Image (spheres, rainbow, N blue to C red):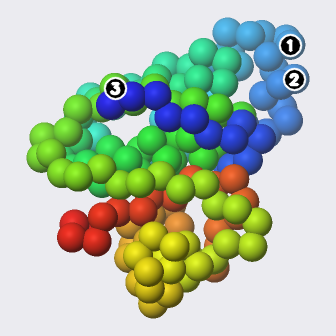
C-alpha cells in the first residue's frame, strides 16, 4: 500500500473535453461522472477486487478494496494511474496472498518491451513476461507509449 505517482498528461483519455465543460456548469455532477468512469476502467478490465471503491480529489485517486493477488492489486493501481489527468494513486487495497511486489517502470521514448526486458532481466527475449504481467491493460506488445507505467514482475513469480 502507498502512494504512486504518474504523469498527469499521459494515459488513456477517458474523461474527454466535455468533463471540463461539465465541471464549469456543475462541479458535483462532473465529479460523480469522473468517479463512475474511473470505476468502469477497473471493471471493464475485469480485475477481481472485492468491496472496490474509488475516491477522487482533483488529480489524486484513492482506491479501496481487497484482492487475492499482488498482481491484481498492482494492475488496479496502474489502470487508474495510466488515465490521463490522474497524477497520483493512493493505494488502500489489501491483498490476501502476499507476494513480492513488481517494479513500476515509466516507458520512455524509444522503449519497446524487449528493450525494457533487456534492462530489467538482462534478456531481450523475456519481453513476453512483461507483456503478460500487464494484461489486460496491454493488448499488444507493440502498443506502449511514453509516460505509461508498466509492471515489471520479479522473474521467480512472473
Which of the pair 105/90 is nearer the observer?
105
Residue annotated with mark 2:
21
* Vertical position of residue 136 compared to residue 128: above or below: above
Q: Marks 2 and 1: CB-CB under 8 Å?
A: yes
Is residue 88 visible in the rendered image? The answer is yes
- Residue 143 placement (x, y as % from top left): 65, 73
Is residue 128 visible in the rendered image? The answer is no
Q: Quadrant of residue 93?
A: top left
Q: Marks 2 and 3: CB-CB under 8 Å?
A: no
Which of the pair 84/158 is nearer the observer?
158
Label 1 crowding class (10 Å Cα cut-off): few <14, some 14-19, many 20+?
few
Label 3 crowding class (10 Å Cα cut-off): few <14, some 14-19, many 20+?
some
Label 2 crowding class (10 Å Cα cut-off): few <14, some 14-19, many 20+?
few
User: Tag 2, which secondary structure?
Assistant: helix
Residue annotated with mark 1:
24
Q: Residue at x 23, y 32 (%)?
A: 94
* Vertical position of residue 123 compared to residue 45: above or below: below
Viewport quadrant of the C terminus: bottom left
- Residue 87 placement (x, y as % from top left): 64, 32
Q: In which quarter of the image is residue 23?
A: top right
Q: Which residue is drawn at 71% across and 37% down?
A: 8
Residue annotated with mark 3:
92
- Residue 48 placement (x, y as % from top left): 28, 48
Amino acid at each position: 500500500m502507498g502512494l504512486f505517482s504518474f504523469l498527469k498528461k499521459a494515459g488513456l483519455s477517458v474523461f474527454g473535453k466535455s468533463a471540463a465543460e461539465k465541471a464549469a456548469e456543475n462541479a458535483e455532477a462532473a465529479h460523480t461522472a469522473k468517479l463512475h468512469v474511473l470505476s468502469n476502467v477497473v471493471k471493464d478490465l475485469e480485475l477481481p477486487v472485492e468491496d472496490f471503491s474509488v475516491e477522487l480529489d482533483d488529480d489524486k485517486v484513492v482506491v479501496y478494496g481487497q484482492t487475492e493477488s499482488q498482481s491484481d492489486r498492482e494492475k488496479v493501481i496502474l489502470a487508474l494511474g495510466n488515465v490521463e489527468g490522474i497524477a497520483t494513486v493512493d493505494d488502500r487495497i489489501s491483498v490476501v496472498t502476499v507476494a513480492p511486489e513488481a517494479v513500476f517502470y515509466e516507458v520512455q521514448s524509444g522503449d519497446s518491451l524487449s528493450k525494457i526486458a533487456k534492462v530489467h532481466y538482462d534478456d531481450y527475449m523475456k519481453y513476453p513476461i512483461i507483456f503478460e504481467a500487464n494484461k489486460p491493460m496491454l493488448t499488444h506488445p507493440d502498443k506502449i507509449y511514453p509516460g505509461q507505467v508498466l509492471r515489471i514482475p520479479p522473474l521467480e513469480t512472473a
